Amino acid sequence: MTDITELAQWLKLEVHRAVSDFNPQMNIKTRDLKELVEALEKAQAKADVYDMLRDDYGLREKGVGLTCFVDWQAKRIAELESRTVTVKLPDYRNTYKAPLADEVEHQVRLALELFSSAAGIKVEAE
């Protein structure tokens, strides 16, 4: 149970006891009411964020819930992460006739591997 549900059930029980005992003095503490109000305010803030996201992505008009949208996004991310892309690097040895051509190509490949791994991209050699 959530805090809201627990607090609401407890307050409902106290009200029921007071009515059953014909006791106009209920034993409800201000602290408990304050906790319930704070929990309700937090829930309202979450609901506002949920509504904002639904409006921003046009989910309300499409009749799509936020959980379905998040699931779709997770599948899309997994699909993109597992996708293989082939990149052909230019052959610097044929472009440059200088003795540094091999070193230039080697450094370009090292830089590509370094930046790719830093971005979380797995590089497979041909």
Image (tube, grey):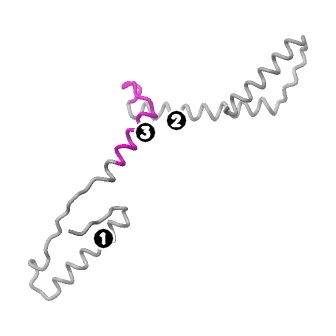
Q: Quadrant of the C terminus?
A: bottom left
Label 1 neighbour load within 10 Å: few <14, some 14-19, many 20+: some
Task: Say which element carries label 3.
Answer: helix
Task: Please say whether residue 73 is one of the residues in the magenta stretch.
Answer: yes
Q: Position of residue 32 (x, y in %)?
A: 79, 31
Q: Earlier in the sequence, mark 3 or mark 2?
A: 2
Q: Residue at x 39, y 34 (%)?
A: 57
Q: Position of residue 109 (x, y in %)?
A: 25, 74
- Which amino acid type corresponds to the residue marked 3 in the rendered image? Val
Q: Residue furthest bottom?
A: 99
Q: Report which residue position mark 1 lands on.
A: 113
Q: Report which residue position mark 2 lands on.
A: 49
Q: Earlier in the sequence, mark 2 or mark 1?
A: 2
Q: Quadrant of the N terminus?
A: top right
110 to the left or right of 100: right
Q: Position of residue 13 (x, y in %)?
A: 80, 21
- Which amino acid type corresponds to the residue marked 1 in the rendered image? Glu
Distance from Cα at disc 3 to Cα at disc 2: 14 Å
Task: Say which element carries label 1.
Answer: helix
Q: Label for residue 70?
A: 3
